[in-house]
Image: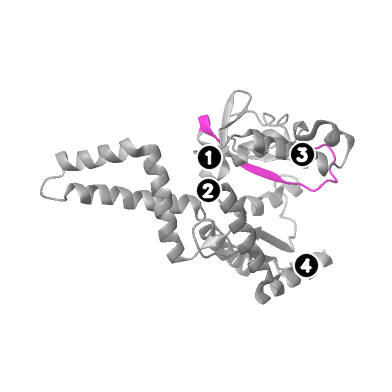
Amino acid sequence: MYDADGLEKAIDDLVKKHAVNAQDLEKGGNTPLLQSDEKKPKMFMCATLEDHDNKVLLKSYHVPYDEKAPREGIKHDFWDSITILQAARATSAAPLYLPKAEYKAHALTDGGLLNNNPIDQVWDARFDLVEPRQPAPNVSVVISLGTTREDEKVKLAADHLMLQLYSRTFGKVLEDMVEIGRNVIDGIATASQAGGEFIDSLYKVLNFTTNTEARHLDFRRRLYFEQGHGRQAGTPQTRYYRFDADVPKPIALDDLAGMRKSLVTETETYLANEKTQGKITECARLLAKT
């Protein structure tokens, strides 16, 4: 597991480096995430509230309180005092890699555990721009930035690396599963088959929790349906752009130097691609019109 000190210092330094007011410069990462200036760009971070088994959206802007809106069992103003550092730590706290974040005695972990690609949350958040129960505002462009994707051959190798990691962490569990297979499954499957089925299930779970591409495809279909069936006549169409580099080999999350080098190299290759440059230009022109 990585030490969180380096990440916390980087967050603090970035807030001070890109300070937009005296408070940011003075407090750095300890600046409140919730901003009172309504003219500032709005953003949110996803996290998992561990003791409630629920995802939460940590927002930099205030949303008019709606008495009828479903909540995660805590007061609507519970997150008002969370800092940029606490929110960024929470959304980065991937289990086995970074320690949990703490806020008001509650444990927070990476939001990707329950939602590894929050594109639907971004789309639904357009309602935060209007009063409760008002029609959704028009959105010209939606941009989704991926964190690299693997082809099928790479996924097989990546599964092997992930299994090694989880085997080191849950080695005794795997051994116990095989032992159960020896003692319980008689005449139906051998112990190795029992262990193999468990490992196969583990592969599928790991792949699902890290597969952001599936969410992207689901949202693309959702937007296509809404544009074709739910959009009122004369309403501008929303354009959706997904930018995500391919990787030719698995990225080992426990190899920080190698991960950084691979991500930079493959992203630069992706951005230099003629098709990618065409998408970026088209997207930029649309944004310039808004």
Residue 208 place in picture, x, y as percent: 45, 53
- Dot 4 or dot 2: first in sequence order is 2
Figure quadrant of residue 119? bottom right
Residue 151 shown left or right of residue 258 in the figure: left
Mark 1 or mark 4: name the one nearer the start of the chain.
1
Would you say residue 231 is visible in this rendering? Answer: no
Residue picked out by circle 2: 253
Q: Which residue is mark 3?
A: 13
Q: Label 4's element?
A: helix
Q: Which residue is mark 4?
A: 284
Q: Which residues are magenta?
A: 35-52
Does residue 79 appear in this view? yes
How many discs mark residues in the rendered view? 4
Q: Earlier in the sequence, mark 3 or mark 2?
A: 3
Q: Which residue is mark 1?
A: 97
Whichever of labels 3 and 1 marks the residue nearer the N terminus, that label is 3
Q: In the image, is residue 230 above or below residue 278? A: above
Amino acid of disc 1: Tyr
Residue 195, which numbered label? none
Residues 80 and 85: in front is 85
Check if mark 4's residue and mark 2's residue have beta carbons within 8 Å. Answer: no
The local crowd at label 4, few if under 14, some if 14 to 19, many if 20 or more residues have their Cα within 10 Å, is few
Amino acid type of disc 3? Asp
Q: Nearer the viewer, mark 4 or mark 2?
A: 2
Mark-to-mark CA distance, 3 and 2:
23 Å
Identify the element where label 1 is drawn: loop
| Residue at the extreme left | 187
Marks 3/4 in contact by CB < 8 Å: the verdict is no
